[in-house]
Image: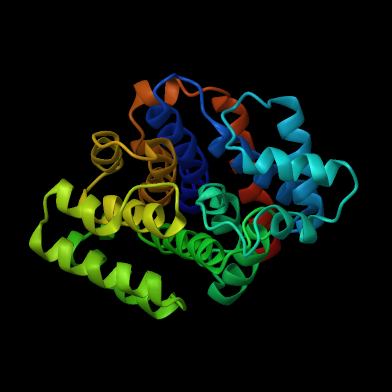
């Protein structure tokens, strides 16, 4: 299989597998549902369009409102459906903006589609985030998660050297980050990795809650601290907190690195809507590949 195609398939499937395992019920949650909506929107537009993506999120929520959405997004989607402009809705519900991880958890299709252009990737990640999460900590979290997946997509198992990868990843993420909160988290991550810190120390330092500045860093850490997709997911699944979302984000990064082949058969075979998710990833890859040719 084409290497980049495998990474497209792997990252979307990795998001859904991580989400499903973290949720513990066999079905994926809103994390994957909005990721699917993002992929559908990009495919139908052959690129990013915030207005259309907002409408797809509304459409998919109406079809499956039971996916486990938090209280904020359904309110946003209902107001958009009523005719309000999405650019005004999120700030209306959350004065100052929400800094939850909802925009980071769904970012995988954007990561992949714009993986080779960091500046454009940041711009689109910010715009995508603002559909529901307008706080700078949410938009930057979405961009940092996106860039982590993009970096992973450029790394292959045949070149995987854990120590070198960690140093390279952290240096590039540090250069990319523009918000001090995330720079501080990355500096803490570097220390924790060098100390081979205990899981309790990692959680205490990085956090694992629904706030983007807690869950995005620990997702990246889980990938860097554990060689292999299964090991990274097992690490996340062993602690509490916002486990399904952290698992989804860590899964997206790890699978972008290793490709779809390394997802354990039992996990991928039991994935809900596996064929559809893989079809979306393949169509994303085909559109992106055709633009490069």
Q: At x 36% / y 34%, what residue is drawn? A: 263
| Residue 276 vertical position relative to residue 113 in the rendered view, above or below | above
Which residue appears farthest toward the front when viewing the image?
A: 95
Q: Is residue 157 something that shows in the picture? A: no
Q: Residue at left 82%, top 46%?
A: 80
Q: Could you say where residue 216 lies in the image, as x and y percent from the top left? A: 40, 56
Residue nearest the observer in this picture, 248 or 279: 248
Q: Is residue 168 left or right of residue 109?
A: left
Write the residue at 29% across / 40% down: 236
Question: Quadrant location of the C terminus?
Answer: bottom right
- Residue 119 x/y as whole percent: 57, 76
Instruction: Please name whichever residue, 287 or 79, is drawn nearer the observer in this view of the structure.
Output: 79
126 to 67, vertically: above or below:
below
Relative side of 117 to 52, left or right: left
Q: Position of residue 162 (x, y in %)?
A: 19, 59
Residue 70, horizontal then vertical, whole percent: 57, 37
Q: Nearer the viewer, residue 251 or 158?
A: 251
Between 184 and 196, which is closer to the camera in this rendering? 184
């Amino acid at each position: 299989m084409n290497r980049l195609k495998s990474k497209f398939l792997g990252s979307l499937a990795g998001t859904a597998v991580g989400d499903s395992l973290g949720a513990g019920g066999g079905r994926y949650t809103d994390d994957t549902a909005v990721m699917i909506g993002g992929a559908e929107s990009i495919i139908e537009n052959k690129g990013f369009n915030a207005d259309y993506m907002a409408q797809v999120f509304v459409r998919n929520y109406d079809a499956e409102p039971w996916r486990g959405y938090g209280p904020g997004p359904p309110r946003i989607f209902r107001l958009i459906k009523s005719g309000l402009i999405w650019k005004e809705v999120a700030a209306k519900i959350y004065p100052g903006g929400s800094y939850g991880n909802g925009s980071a958890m769904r970012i995988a299709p954007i990561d992949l589609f714009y993986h080779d252009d960091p500046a454009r990737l940041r711009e689109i990640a910010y715009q995508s985030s603002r559909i529901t999460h307008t706080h700078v900590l949410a938009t930057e979290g979405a961009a940092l998660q996106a860039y982590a997946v993009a970096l992973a997509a450029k790394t292959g198992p045949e070149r995987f050297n854990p120590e070198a990868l960690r140093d390279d990843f952290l240096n590039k993420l540090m250069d990319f980050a523009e918000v001090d909160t995330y720079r501080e988290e990355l500096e803490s991550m570097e220390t924790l990795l060098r100390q081979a810190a205990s899981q309790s120390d990692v959680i205490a330092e990085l956090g694992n809650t629904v706030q983007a500045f807690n869950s995005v860093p620990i997702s990246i850490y889980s990938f860097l601290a554990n060689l292999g997709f299964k090991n990274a997911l097992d690490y996340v699944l062993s602690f509490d907190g916002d486990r399904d979302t952290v698992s989804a984000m860590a899964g997206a990064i790890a699978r972008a690195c290793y490709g779809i082949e390394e997802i354990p058969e039992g996990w991928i075979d039991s994935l809900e809507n596996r064929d559809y998710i893989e079809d979306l990833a393949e169509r994303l890859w085909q559109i992106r590949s055709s633009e490069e040719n």
